[in-house]
Amino acid sequence: MTSSSHYPRLYRDFGKRVFDILLVVLSAPIVLTFTVLFALFLACQGVKPFYLQPRVGRNGKVFNLIKLRTMVHDADSVLELHLSDNPDARDEWERNQKLRLDPRIIKGGLLLRKSSMDELPQFWNVLVGDMSLVGPRPMMVCQQKLYPSDTHYYSMRPGLSGTWQVSKRNNSSFVDRALHDNAYWKDMSFSTDLSILARTVSVVLRGTGC
């Protein structure tokens, strides 16, 4: 006899991946069109439109996350110089791992980030299995020491969107992400993913990205 308790596991182990691939393939024409247009816009500014950044994935495996470039090439040194000159900014960075006024952003980059269009190339990460459409936001390698150990983050593929991204994404601390990740692991289902993706569309349309 099949228990209803088996269904979340069935979706987690099989159905979620099928859903990811199906939706990525169906959305490919639109995603590719906008990605190419934004890449050409960035190339016209004399910058390389794409960049790769190591992120921590499922089971702690490190993969290269693909994004449209929204920051200057020497972003790390620019950030460190800014933080060394601005104690308030350093406090904000250590608390949230992001800045409301980020000196690294290039022309047009803020619009791409606010609209979340810089995330479009990550549909490729989803297709090859590094990520899922819905899941924890993929953390940088250096952020692992800041992340609570009692979390289900490492049991899931990181997500293009997730509960954190569609909630207080600009106002919560980095550590708060673990609460969202644990809640999502508990509630993971097809209906939960559909709900988060629908809310993601609202976030994109309202331009509340970060």
Image (cartoon, rainbow, N blue to C red):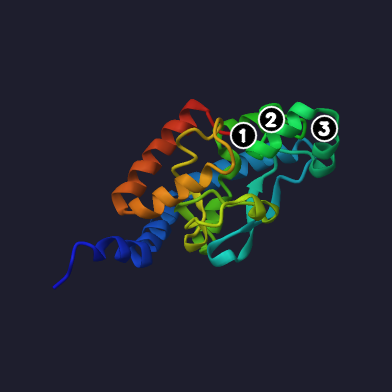
Discs 2, 1 touching: Cβ within 8 Å: yes
**What residue is shown at x 64% (from left), y 63% (from top)?**
62
SS state under label 2: loop
Look at the numbered disc 3 and give the secondary structure of its residue.
helix
Q: Is residue 95 above or below residue 22?
A: above
- The CA distance from mark 1 to mark 3 is 22 Å
Label 1 or label 3, whichever lies nearer to me, is: 3
Q: Please state the horizontal and vertical placement of residue 83, each as a whole percent of the image.
A: 80, 34
Residue 49 location, x and y as percent? Answer: 71, 45
In which image quadrant can residue 145 be found? bottom right
170 horizontally vs 163: left or right: right
> Could you say which disc has been placed on residue 112 in the image?
1
- Residue at image location 61% in from the left, 44% down from the top: 36
The residue that label 3 is drawn on is: 82
Query: Within the image, what quadrant is residue 185 found in?
Result: bottom left
Q: Residues within 10 Å of mark 1 (few under 14, many from 20)?
A: many
* Left or right position of 98 against 81: left
Residue 196 in picture, x, y percent from top left: 38, 42
| Distance from Cα at disc 3 to Cα at disc 2 | 20 Å
Q: Amino acid at mark 3?
A: His
**Foreground label between 3 and 2:** 3
Report the quarter where the N terminus lies. bottom left
Q: Dividing the picture into quarters, in which one does residue 61 lie?
A: bottom right
Query: Circle 2 is placed at which residue position?
Result: 108
Tell which circle, 1 or 3, labels the residue nearer the N-terminal end. 3
